Image (tube, grey):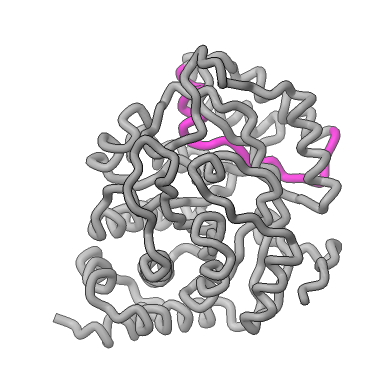
Amino acid sequence: MSSLVSLLDRAAGGGRLTFDEGVRLYNDADIHDLGAAAHARRMQLYPTNVVTYVIDTTINYTNVCNVHCTFCAFFRPENHKEGYTMSHDTVLERVKYAADQGATQIMIQGGVNPELGIDWFETLFDRVRREYPDVDIHSLSVSEIVGLAHVEQIGIHDVLSRLKAAGMKSLPGAGAEILVERVRKRISARKVKPHEWLDVMRVAQTLGMPTTATMMFGSIETAEERIEHMHVLRELQDETGGFTAFIPWYYVPFKTPLRGREATGLEYLRVLAVSRLYLDNFPHLQASWLTPGLKMGQMALFYGCDDMGGTIIEERVVHDAGSTNEATRRDLESLIVKAGFTPVIRDTYWNTRNDIALATAV
C-alpha cells in the first residue's frame, strides 16, 4: 500500500487517484498536507498569481416546484398561497439591474414549475439575448430541463436544442447534490436520478454547451459517497471534456425540513483539496463562498481553488435556507489581493474581460 505522502505527491503532480486512494486521502490525510498538495497542483495548472471571478446574478424566477426536496426552504408546492412566478418584464428588469453593474453572466433558475412550458423560456431567453446582447445566459438546472421534457413530452436533446436556439449558451451544474442513489432517495426522492443528471449533462456537452458541475455536501452522505460523486463526474469528463469547473458547496440546514448540522470550515477545505486532487481532468475549481462565508472563500485559494466564483448580485434559494453572506465586486477583489493574488474578471467561459475595469480592490 502506498504511503499517504506518496499519494499526495503523485496527485500534486497530476497523477490519477483510484477510488480507494481518494477515500483514503479524504479520511486519513492531514488537512495541511492535503491543502499543500492541492495548492501545488493548482499552481502547476496556473502558475501565475491570477485568481478569476465573474460578475453575475441569479434570478430565481419562480418558487413553485413539484420536486419538494427536503433540503430546500425556497420552494412552494403547486397552488400554495406563497408561490410566485415572475413575469418576463420583471425578469428583464433584474437582468437590466445586473447588466448595469457590469454582469456578464445571468443565471435564471427556479423551481420545477409544471405550469411553465418551453415556449415561456424560449420567449424569455430570446428577449434577454436581444435586449442585453453582452450577457451570457448560463441558466436553468438539470431538474428544470427534465421537467420541461415531461411537460412537453419531448426528449432532452430537443429541449436543450430549442433553448440553445433561443439564447441559452451554457448549463449550470445545479441539482446534482450527491450523485448517489441512496442519498437521492433520502433527501430528494422526486428529483432526477444520478444517471439522468449525467445524461442531461452529456447531451448538453454534445450540443456544444459548456457546463459546470456542483456538489452539495453535508446532508446525510458519507465520505465514500462524496468520492463516488467526484468519480462519476471524472468519468463523464474523460468521455466528453465538457465541464469547465467543479463547484462544491455545503448544505445550509437552518430553515429546511431536513435540518441537521452545518459543515465545518475544515470540512469545507478538505472537500476542496480532495476535489482538486481527485478531479485531475477538471480545469477549474471554484470557491463557493456563499455558504461558508467570505473568509473561508479566501482560505479556499490555498486549498486548490483558482476561481472565486461570482458576485451573485441576487439570490434567494440559499438565502431562504438561512445563509446571510453577500459580496460586492470590491469585496471579492479585496479578498483576492489580501491573499496575495491578482484579481481578474472573466466571463462564463473563463475568457478574461480586460474591457471591464476592476472595482479598486483595496
Evaluate whether residue 13 shows in this view.
no
Magenta stretch: give its range. 131-150
Residue 234 higher or lower than 334, as above or below: above
Q: Nearer the viewer, residue 215 or 186?
A: 186
Residue 105 shows in the view: yes
Residue 124, quarter of picture: top right
- Residue at left 51%, top 71%? 300
Q: Quadrant of the N terminus?
A: bottom left
Position in image of residue 5 (x %, y %): 27, 87
Nearer to me, 290 or 282: 290
Q: Is residue 219 left or right of residue 50?
A: left
User: Quick check: 161 above or below 233?
Assistant: above
User: For residue 188: magenta?
Assistant: no
Residue under the image location 41 percent in, 43 percent down: 176
Tell me residue 113's x, y (percent): 53, 21
Hey, which quadrant is residue 16 in on the image? bottom left
Residue 166, given in percent of the width and then of the height, sits at 70, 29
Which residue sits at x=51%, y=55%?
Answer: 291
Picture coordinates of residue 225 (x, y %)?
26, 54
Q: Residue at x 43, y 54 (%)?
A: 250
Please state the total of marks drawn on the protein image: 0
- On screen, residue 65 above or below 100: above
